[in-house]
Image (spheres, rainbow, N blue to C red):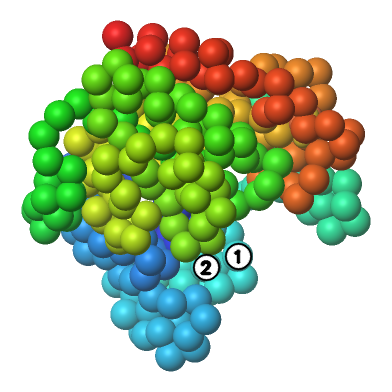
Amino acid sequence: MKSILLIRYSALGDVVLATSLLAPLRAKYPQVRIEWVVDAAYATLLEGVVDRVIPFSRKDGASRAAVLHDVKGRFDLAIDLQNKVWSVRVARAAAPKRLRFVRRTPLQALGSLFGRDTIFNEVPTTTLYARAAQLDEAGPLKLVVSEDARRRAAQLMGEGRWIAVAPGAAWETKRWAPERFGQVAAALRSEGFRVALLGGPMDGPLLEAVRKTCTVDADLTAESMNVLAAALARTELLVGNDSGLVHVALAVGSKPLALFGPTSLTRWGPRAPGAAVSLGLPCSPCSNHGSHGCPLGHHDCLEKLDVATVLAAARQLLG
Ligand code: SF4
């Protein structure tokens, strides 16, 4: 095996989890050249971990066509972890041998179309990726922070012991109250840590609530994904929801503390000791990716997760 094309272009967490295939692939196929098709938003994150990154924009037809042209017939094996109509086309164009991550059986896919989604709670995503790639087991997550990003993070943060908080998550039910993130950060700040705030444009009100509850020493909410990764490499702990950033933290050598409510800790939790907190309610997990509202109307899985519990878990990780 001389060349492999990896296809996983979204979302952030899944892309980072897919880096767990790189070490076992290189162990199984020494000297192999690995290229990766990824959404342009995450492309720079993958530089340094594969031989070449092939970025594209999903909404741009010309960009998609350029990828098909680029990969055509150049690979021995294509591993499609995205498994969408377009990713299947890319894999077919790229290589005679193809492996694919199948998320749902046809019956499960039908159920999901009619609002009866199967909740996956048995096997970690990284294990499923490894099985799809015909590997014995997944390796560690790995991202390489670029020198430019490292310099920018150093400029913004300076010296000191840092913790970070990221109150965002794509779906409402996955979000712990932002004021509580602020309270955790304020408590750790009073113990000598400096606080970095991480997030993106769609997290606006959540970030504002943290700013109102805690003094923020480095506001990184306008920075690129690369700089966020570099900032995480400088922090001792990231407290966040079930979101992509907790996987980024683990992949750059920081310690994440992920707060889990409606989604599966087994399936999506960071694979490190003490890296997640969940109340483990009987109704949890109730969805695969979160939802706009709690099906039971109370959202106890995160409402009843108090600041003291999260703070204790954070102090444990900080030693
Ligand atoms: S049903 Fe349970 S796990 Fe799901 S959102 Fe409500 S409280 Fe959380």
Whereabouts is ligand 1, in terms of quadrant?
Answer: top right
Q: State if disc 2 and disc 1 touch (CB < 8 Å).
A: yes
Tell me: is circle 2 under 8 Å from ligand 1.
Answer: no
Q: CA distance from mark 1 to mark 2?
A: 5 Å
Query: Residue 73 location in percent, x, y?
Result: 34, 75
In the rendered image, which quarter is residue 251 located in? top left
Numbered mark located on residue 21 in the image: none
Which residue is painted at 81% across and 39% down in the image? Answer: 294
Crowd tier of the residue under label 2, counting other residues whose Cα lies within 10 Å: few below 14, some 14–19, many 20 or above: many
Indicate the secondary structure of the residue bearing disc 2: helix
Crowd tier of the residue under label 1, counting other residues whose Cα lies within 10 Å: few below 14, some 14–19, many 20 or above: few
Q: Which residue is mark 1?
A: 84
In the rendered image, which quarter is residue 247 located in? top left
Q: Nearer the viewer, residue 284 or 313?
A: 313
Which residue is painted at 61% across and 36% down in the image? Answer: 177
| Quadrant in the picture for the C terminus | top left
**Looking at numbered disc 2 in the image, what kind of residue is underneath it?**
Ser
Where is 37 relative to 133, above or below?
Answer: below
Q: Nearer the viewer, residue 19 or 24?
A: 19
Which residue is painted at 80% across and 18% down in the image? Answer: 282
Q: Nearer the viewer, residue 184 or 100?
A: 184
